[in-house]
Amino acid sequence: MNTVVERELELNLVLSPERSIPVPARLTYRTDDPYAVHVAFHIGSDSPVNWTFARELLVEGVFRPCGHGDVRIWPTKIDSRSVICMALTSPDGDALLEAPSVAVSAWLERTLLMVPPGTETEQLGIEEALAELLAPLPADDLWLRDPWPSDESQDGEA
């Protein structure tokens, strides 16, 4: 059974140290994709801008700076507000976003209650799929029979 945990929130897109603009976003976690979090940014275009990255990265980023390359996350305080900063890099450009820590942490906690860390593989059903794939079929015994019976006589005649 697939379960989805979503949260709508407003992030701030940082344009300069003095200026930012609000960006509506949706955080999504799906139990059928247990290692990932999905973020859809609604920037006024026909379709949202979607990012997917490791849930573990966001969990760590709530507490300390982490990530490198395309996604970097770290906690900080801005005007006595606790925020989670997300620096995203793509061929189309770079973005620095600030998310309210309380909202992100509460949503993240719901995902962790749904699928505790270390149990993600169970959600994928790999063991069950492998067992089904490797289970013997009725036709399998045909392959195990000798297709060319021995030329030796069964009754001992030569």
Image (cartoon, grey):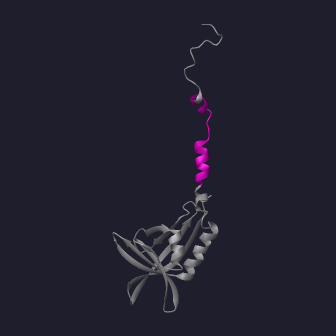
Residue 139 placement: quadrant: top right
Q: Quarter holding the N terminus?
A: bottom right
Residue 134 on the magenta segment:
yes
The front one of 87 and 92 is: 87
Q: Is residue 58 above or below residue 98?
A: above
Residue 137 placement: quadrant: top right
In the picture, measured across the screen, residue 141 lies left or right of residue 55, that is right
Q: Main secondary structure of the magenta part?
A: helix
The front one of 40 and 93 is: 93
- Give how far across and how far down residue 73 sits, in percent: 47, 77
- Give how far across and how far down residue 38 sits, in percent: 50, 68
Q: Residue furthest right?
A: 155
In the picture, measured across the screen, residue 48 lies left or right of residue 101, that is left
Number of marks in picture: 0
Q: Residue at x 57, y 78 (%)?
A: 105
The front one of 107 and 133 is: 133
Residue 144 placement: quadrant: top right
Q: Residue at x 56, y 80 (%)?
A: 103
Q: Quarter holding the C terminus?
A: top right
Magenta segment: 125-143
- Give how far across and how far down residue 25 sits, in percent: 48, 75
Residue 26 on the magenta segment:
no
- Give how far across and how far down residue 43 sits, in percent: 41, 75
Q: Residue furthest top?
A: 158
Q: Is residue 36 above or below residue 72?
A: above
The front one of 58 and 106 is: 58
